[in-house]
Amino acid sequence: MLSKRIMMFSIAVFIIAMITVSCVQVIYEDPSEIDFSPEETAPVATEDAVMVDEDFRQLQFVQQGDVRIFYDASVAAYLDDAGTFVPPSSGEEAYIDPHPGYADFNFSPMQAHVYVADAAAYQAAADFAPGVIADLQRVIEGMSVADPCVPELPLGTFFHECFHQQFVSNFKQVSFGNGSGVRFITVYAIQDYAPVGNDSLVYVFQGFTDDGKYYVKMKVEMMHAQLEGVGEIPMEIYAANDAAIINAFFREYAVMFEASENEFTPDLAWIDSVLESLYIQ
């Protein structure tokens, strides 16, 4: 009887040992077969790692450097690529003011660009930037615009500033996902004066994220049904050699644009809605 119990105990021990060995083989793989590459061992990215407002958490985004633009499906067809990074400049190049590095996102076929720069870095890079930023923030908060000029930081392939604006029309406050700003229509002139035509008309938006971290600028090439392809300034306007007469000439365009806002292409309200759908981080 005792020998039978010993035999049964031995069998039980053998079975437990086999189970233990089997479990060990399952838990501990052969180290030579494990992939320890950085790609396999890196933490798995989750949506929660991206700190955005709940309403924007599910949106797609493009990234350039540290800047992300989140966008919804209505914008996806127009966002050309992940954008480019424009390196900083000390302002030594011809016709280029000093600026920090910034992200340039191309929206095609809208003929539009969204530029995003770190506001603090801009203030450090250019001595004029703190004053312009303060003036622009006051305009965004509701201060009236001094005609014909909106405070403007020169960013993008066109380095225009406030005094390059020949007029300001269709001025409006516009918010985006996590910020706000103002938009307007204008024609720029670097030297002398530039004719107003469908080859020179632009929509410009400028604003800041709510936390003040980023300066955001959008430029869209525009057309208007009442304009010629190439504009013209009558010789008598030039001949007058009078700033008041020239300014009055351009203000007539501003009045016309204000009265015919629905004749722009692309539609101004649609461009505003594209901006409103963006979240910048």
Image (tube, rainbow, N blue to C red):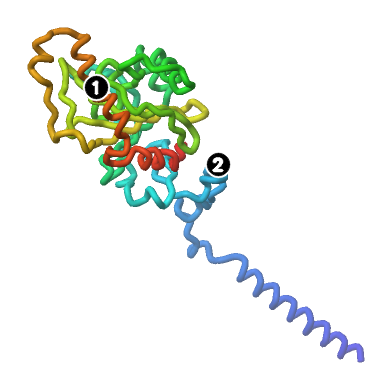
Q: Alpha carbon of mark 2 to alpha carbon of mark 1: how far?
A: 43 Å
Q: Which three-letter amino acid code belongs to the residue tagged 1?
A: Glu
Residue in view at x 54 percent, y 50 percent: 46
Question: Helix, strand, or loop for circle 2?
Answer: loop
Q: Where's residue 238, x and y in %?
A: 11, 14
Q: Which residue is mark 1?
A: 252
Q: In terms of depth relative to the viewer, which is nearer, 68 or 160?
A: 160
Relative height, residue 180 to residue 110 (above, below): above
Identity of the residue furthest to the right in this view: 1
Residue 175 visible in the snapshot: yes
Relative height, residue 92 to residue 5 (above, below): above
In-image side of 197 versus 51 (left or right): left
Residue in view at x 37 percent, y 50 percent: 76
The answer to which of marks 2 and 1 sits earlier in the sequence is 2
Q: Where's residue 203, x and y in %?
A: 30, 32
Q: Which three-letter amino acid code belongs to the residue tagged 2?
A: Asp
Q: In terms of depth relative to the viewer, which is nearer, 226 or 8?
A: 226
Question: Helix, strand, or loop for circle 1?
Answer: helix
To which quarter of the image does residue 269 belong? Answer: top left
To which quarter of the image does residue 198 belong? Answer: top left
Relative height, residue 97 to residue 46 (above, below): above
Q: Residues within 10 Å of mark 1 (few under 14, many from 20)?
A: few
Residue in view at x 87 percent, y 89 percent: 3
**Cβ atoms at labels 2 and 1 below 8 Å apart:** no
Residue in view at x 92 percent, y 92 percent: 1
In-image side of 249 versus 22 (left or right): left
Q: Residues within 10 Å of mark 2 (few under 14, many from 20)?
A: few
Relative height, residue 16 to residue 233 (above, below): below
In-image side of 214 versus 128 (left or right): right
